[in-house]
Amino acid sequence: MMKEQITPEFLFLHRRELIQKGFLLGMASVFPKWAFGATSFPAKKNEKYGLPDKDLVLTKEDVATSYNNFYEFSLEKGEVKTKVEKWNFNSKDWKIEISGLVEKKKSYSVEELCELAGGIEERIYRFRCVEAWSMVVPWTGFPLARLIEKLKPKSSAKFVKFQSFSDQKIGSNMSELPQYPWPYTEGLTLAEAMNPLTLIATGMYGKTLPKQNGAPLRLVTPWKYGFKSIKSIVKIEFTDVQPKTLWSSLAPAEYGFYANVNPQVDHPRWSQATERILDSSFFPKRKPTLMFNGYEKEVADLYKGLDLAKNY
Amino acid sequence: MSLKIRNLKSSLFRILLLVPAGYWVYLIGSGSIGVDPAKTLNHKTGEIALYYILFNLLLGILISFSFRFPVFLRFLLMQRRFVGVLSFVFLIFHIFLYLTMEGFETKAWTQLVTKTYLIFGLGAWIILFALAVTSNDFSVRRLGVKRWKRFHRLVYIASALFTAHILSIEKTDLIKYGSLLLSLWGLQIIRVLWVWRKKRITRKVINAKQV
Ligand code: HEM
C-alpha cells in the first residue's frame, strides 16, 4: 500500500465534522435560502400578507418612525424619536429570556431566536392604535407560532407573558411616571400567540427596527390595539394564569386583557367606530374601523362564545 | 412718562403671551408639527390656555392676600382681561382641533355630550365663553363693577370643571397637571380661610367700637 493512500491523520480526525459540513453544503444547494433561516435584510416578502386592502396605501416610513407611543421615553409621540438617541443600543448584546412552563428555558440572542423560528419574512399589516388612529406598516419578522413550536411549552401553559426592559437608564422617562407598574408587560392566550398572524418583528420597511419602534424585537398582533404590540422584549414567559398587563393594571376600565379592535365597543373617552389614517396632514383620510381590524376571518374563532363587550 | 413705560411693558407682555401661538404657526409652516397635527395642537392649545387661566387665578389669589406688588409688576394687574380673552381664543382652537381630529363626523358632536370628560370640558368652555365676551369696558359699565365681579366669579365653577376634564384623561402628564391643579386648589382653600378670618376680625373690631 502506498503511503498516500493511508488517510492522512488530520482528515481522519475531522472526518465527522467534514461529513456534516458536506451534508449541509449539499442541502444548501438543494433548498432555498429561507429553509436555513435567512435572517438578513431585506427579507423575502410573504405574498399572502401583501397590502391588506387595495384602497389602503403604505404609511410613509418617516411617519411610522416618528410617531411612537413609547412612554418609557416620552409621553409625546413625536418626541420619542429624539429621546431614544441617548439609548446606547447594541442588538448583539440584547438577550431574550425564555422562561416559565416551557422546555427550552434559556437566554437567546435575537439572531438565535430568528434562526430557531426558521428565518424572517416581510408582511404588510394594518396597525390600529387605541387612540383611534391607524397606519399600514410593512413588518419584518417571524410568526411567533414557529418559535413556540421549537420552544416546546408544557401542556399546562395557557398564556404567554411578554416583558419589556426595566432599565431606567434606558427608559429615561420611566421615573417621571412612578404610578406606572413598570416594566411594560403584555400577554396573549397561547391560542392567540399560536395564531399565524401573530408576528415577532425585528424590522420594518426592509430594515432592522428603529429604536423608537421597539428595537431589537417586538410583538405585532394586528387585530388588537397597538398597545398589545409590546416593544423591546427582554422576556417571554409561559404561564398558566392570565398575565397582568401594564395598561390593564393602570386603567382597568379603559384597557382590557384582550384589547381586540372593535368598532362597537367605545373607549370610555372616545368612540372606536372610525379612525384617521395618519399621514401628517390636518385632515387625514378616515375610514370606518373594522371588526378585529379587518382580520375577522383569521381570528374570530379564537373568541367564540366570549362576550366582547365585557372582555374588551 | 410712567404711562409710556407702562404701555411699553404691557405691549411686550402681550407679545410674550403670543410667542407659543407664533411657535405653533412656525411648526406648521416648517412642516415639523408632526404626524398628527390636529391632535398635537389640540394638546398644546389646551395646555397653554390652562397656564394663562392659572396665571389670572394666581393674580386673584395674590390680591386677596393683599400682596404688595413691586411697582415694576403692577402693570400685570391691568392685563387680566387680555390674558383671559387670549386663553379663550386658544380654547376655541382647542375645540376646533378636537373636531378636526374627529373628522367633524357625527361622533365628534355626540361624544361632546356623552363622554364625561368632554361634558366637563364643554361646561367649562361655555362658562369661559360667557366670561370672555363680557371682558370689555362696555360690559363692565353695563353690569356695574359689583355685578360684573360677581358674575366673573363663575370662573371658579369653570375651574372645577376643567380640573375634572384634565385629570380624567388617564394618558396625560398626571404629575405636571396634577401638581399644578392641586396647588391651585390648595391656594384657593387657604385664600377662602384667610378671607374669612379677615372678615371675622374686622367684624370684631366694628363690634368692639359699637360697645
Ligand atoms: C368642549 C370643550 C372641550 C373639548 C371638546 C376638549 C377636548 C379635549 C381633548 C380631546 C383633549 C385630549 C384628550 C386625550 O388626549 O385623550 C383635551 C385635553 C386637554 N384639555 Fe380640553 N377640551 C375642552 C375644554 C377644555 C377647557 C375649558 C380647558 C381649560 C383649560 C381644557 C384644557 C385641556 C388640557 C390642559 C388638556 C391636556 C392637554 C395635554 O395632554 O397636554 N380643555 N381636551
Image (cartoon, rainbow, N blue to C red):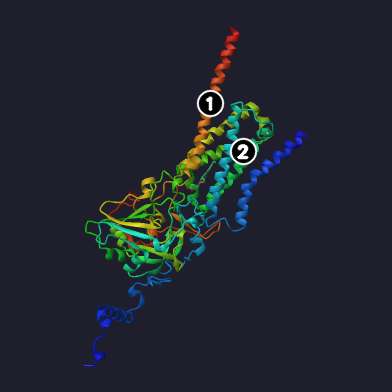
Q: Amino acid at mark 1?
A: Val
Report in which chain the residue with disc 2 lies. Answer: B
| Real-space CA distance between mark 2 and mark 1, rounded to the nearest whole angstrom | 22 Å
- Give the x, y percent position of residue A23: 28, 80
Whether residue A114 is situated above or below residue A246 in the rendered picture: below
Q: Which residue is mark 2?
A: B84
Q: Are marks 2 and 1 on the same chain?
A: yes
Label 2: few (<14), some or many (≥20) within 10 Å?
many
Q: Nearer the viewer, residue B50 or A297?
A: B50
Report in which chain the residue with disc 1 lies. Answer: B
Judged from the image, the secondary structure of the residue bearing numbered disc 1 is: helix
Can the viewer see residue A116?
Answer: yes
Label 1: few (<14), some or many (≥20) within 10 Å?
few
- To which quarter of the image does residue A46 belong? bottom left
- Give the x, y percent position of residue B185: 51, 33
Can the viewer see residue A251?
Answer: no
Whether residue A104 is situated above or below residue B128 in the rendered picture: below
Q: Earlier in the sequence, mark 2 or mark 1?
A: 2
- To which quarter of the image does residue B71 belong? top right
Q: Nearer the viewer, residue A27 or A284?
A: A27
- Give the x, y percent position of residue A47: 39, 72
Disc 1 under 8 Å from ligand 1? The reply is no
Judged from the image, the secondary structure of the residue bearing numbered disc 2 is: helix
Q: Amino acid at mark 2?
A: Gly
Q: Which residue is mark 1?
A: B192
Residue lying at the far bottom of the rendered structure: A1
